[in-house]
Amino acid sequence: MSEETSVSATTIQRIINEQVKYYQPYYQSMPENLSIDEFKYGEGQMAFEYIDVVTGTILDILPSKDTRTIKYHFRSRYSQKQGNQVKTITTDKNASYVSFLQELFPNAQIIINRFHIVQLVNRSMNKTRVKVMNRLRTSNGEDQKKYRRLKRFWRKFLKKESALSYTTYQYFSMFWKRLEAAIVSEMLGYDPELKETYRVYQAILKSVEENDNLR
């Protein structure tokens, strides 16, 4: 957000902290499409908010994100009938949220925010690369070469496959003059787990880009 507005993160945090003081909650009804999230305020504390997705209205902000606080809030402020009216809930990948949201809103479809899906698979892809890389950390000369390549060119694995260059030859250290797509393909050949993880990673990126259903 700070990059988009050319305002420092500190300034944005100060504005959020000030606005929270004047916020008035809305308890009359529950929208059909809900979004929940958490954010930092004060001295590193984490708050919880829920929003009407259609109107963008913040319905309430809770000073804590712990499960007990959130469950008590919804059960004391809204009837089960109101909770049953919620059709979709957009959230991040926080597993604790998913477990109790289904209790509070039994008819709602839980939708994981696409940004968090990409973030999750990005980390998984990199975790596999590191695992394979460390397996190659041996005294064998060929393994050492593969290890250095996987360590140096880690960003290539996280790049969308469609964004790799397939036509322009470039100089890459430890590869000399090659196609970018060719060096990725060669490194994927070092390990079947790495290759399969990359295939799944790219398939998910493509689905997100093409707006496929990612339930």
Image (cartoon, grey):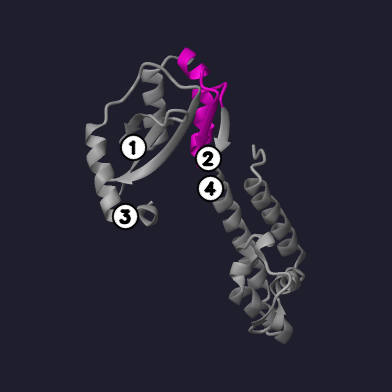
Label 4 to label 2: alpha-carbon separation: 16 Å
Task: Check disc 3 and give the amino acid type.
Answer: Ala
Figure quadrant of residue 109: top right
Classify 10 Å Cα crowding around label 1: few (below 14), some (14-19), many (20 and above): some
Disc 3, SS: helix
Lower position in the chain sequence, tag 1 or tag 2? 1
Lower position in the chain sequence, tag 1 or tag 3? 3
Task: Check disc 2 and give the amino acid type.
Answer: Ala
Give the residue pinned by disc 2.
95
Label 1 to label 2: alpha-carbon separation: 17 Å
Which residue shows up at 59% across the image and 57% down it? 122
Disc 2, SS: helix
The reply to whether callout 3 and callout 4 are in contact (CB within 8 Å) is: no
Which residue shows up at 36% across the image and 16% down it? 28
The reply to whether callout 1 and callout 2 are in contact (CB within 8 Å) is: no
Lower position in the chain sequence, tag 4 or tag 2? 2
Image coordinates of residue 39 in percent, x first then y, are 37, 43
The disc label shown at residue 115, or none: 4
Classify 10 Å Cα crowding around label 2: few (below 14), some (14-19), many (20 and above): few
Image coordinates of residue 136 in percent, x first then y, are 68, 75
Lower position in the chain sequence, tag 2 or tag 3? 3
